[in-house]
Amino acid sequence: MMFHRVLGLAAVGCLVAAAAQAQISDDVVKIGVLTDMSSLYADIGGKGSVVAAEMAVKDFGGKVAGKPIEVVSADHLNKPDVGANIARQWIDQDHVDAIVDVPTSSVALAVQDVTKEKDRVFLISGAASSDLTGKSCSPTGVHWTYDTYALAHGTGSALVKQGGDTWFFITADYAFGHALERDTSAVVKAAGGKVLGAVRAPLNTPDFSSFLLQAQASKAKIIGLANAGGDTINSIKQGAEFGIVQGGQRFAGLLVFISDVHSLGLQTAQGLVLTSAFYWDQNDATRAWAKRFMAETNKVPTMVQAGVYGAVTHYLKAIAAAKTDEGKAVVAKMREIPINDFMTHNGKLREDGRVMRDIYLFQVKSPAESKYPYDYYKQLAVIPADQAFRPLSESECPLVKKG
């Protein structure tokens, strides 16, 4: 009788021990890079984001909790329905544990709905809408790199302080553009400035003539470009043809990437003030990582691509610590572990999914100031995390406990 009891206790002990061991679903950790491979945001994320994720996996050793790590990728075509369908198929059929990047906020909001429903981790680097950690927040959503609130309080606030107190917006007509115009307008008005008008432009518009003429006619000191990637490039290039800057107005590129500056050239882009979470030439650590990235891609990394690397690395650290890849448990562990890498120092993941990190205000150099390839920015200011991002007291996220 005693022998059977001992056997029974031993069996229970084995079960407890097994439960305490790593619980990795399907014996593999699979990460899906969902991005724009073929359109106006391909240089911002695209294949570079896939390379960044693969670099993170390689640097982690290719395994976590004793299980292999795989990276898959797909093009969401900047369409919310396509992005959501890929996310659903990845999770249901391909057993993807985390989705990363997703430039285009309308796509990211759709994918966040899927990952929330399926308890999968969503590591957002490319999308910008502050609603992703606001009214549309998720317990498994992590907004890693930047957002429209930070862009508005960086670039928008700096330009108002420089005397740019009247604004007209050319806005990408989808979730990202609307959020960026909203957040920047709030900053302008709070500083005593005025918004004289706005016009909405379809995504990936080849011809900005009519929008630029309306902005020019407004006589606003600042033409706020609430767009990104190819749309920002086309706005500024075509604006030069209309003599907008020569006429005394200034462009505010509210989301400008180093790939945009490279496409524009310093002659056209010089003087632009921009907000970024990362610049490749900031310090020895950023230069070392960027050199490795450029060896793989022949392109200078954007903050989105650097953010993909950082997000994937922190996600894998959390799995190793939590000994599971279950969504909510991993994100809870991601909140516990401080974030430290080449682009983030003593960062912290907040309860609404917002990663709190310092960001930077830069100005694009003139051709004469640039001394070597991709020597494009000079740093104007460090914006501390608690000033850059929305205070929890103002959050619409239902996960935030109100005092």
Image (tube, rainbow, N blue to C red):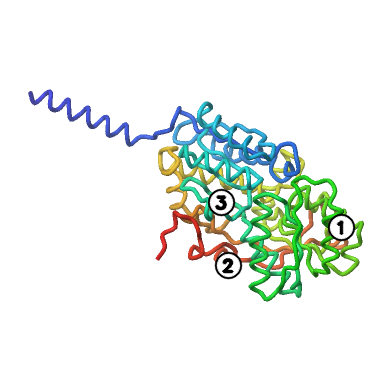
Locate residue 211, reporting x and y percent: 82, 56
- In this view, the mark in front (2 or 3): 3
Q: Earlier in the sequence, mark 1 or mark 2?
A: 1
Residue type of the residue flagged with mark 3: Leu
| Label 1: how many Cα within 10 Å (few below 14, some 14–19, many 20+) | many
Q: Element type at marker 3?
A: helix
Which quadrant holds the C terminus? bottom left
Q: Quadrant of residue 81?
A: top right
In the picture of the structure, the residue carrying the numbered disc 3 is 132
Q: Is residue 330 above or below residue 349?
A: above
Horizontal placement of 334 versus 174: left or right?
A: left
Of 238 and 26, nearer the camera is: 238
Camera-nearest residue between 300 and 244 = 244
Picture coordinates of residue 252 (x, y %)?
Answer: 76, 62
Give me the residue at 66% from left, 74% from top: 191
Viewer-proximal residue, 349 or 5? 349
Contact check, label 3 and label 1, Cβ < 8 Å: no
The disc label shown at residue 387, or none: 2
Which quadrant of the view contains residue 62? top right
Residue under the point 79% across and 61% down? 364
**Real-space CA distance between mark 1 and mark 2, rounded to the nearest whole angstrom:** 32 Å
Q: Quadrant of the N terminus?
A: top left
Query: Dot 3 surroundings within 10 Å: few (below 14), some, or many (20 or more)?
Result: many
- Name the residue type under label 2: Gln
State the SS at label 1. helix
Q: CA distance from mark 3 to mark 1?
A: 32 Å
Residue at x 43% of width, y 48% of height: 332
Residue beneath disc 1: 239
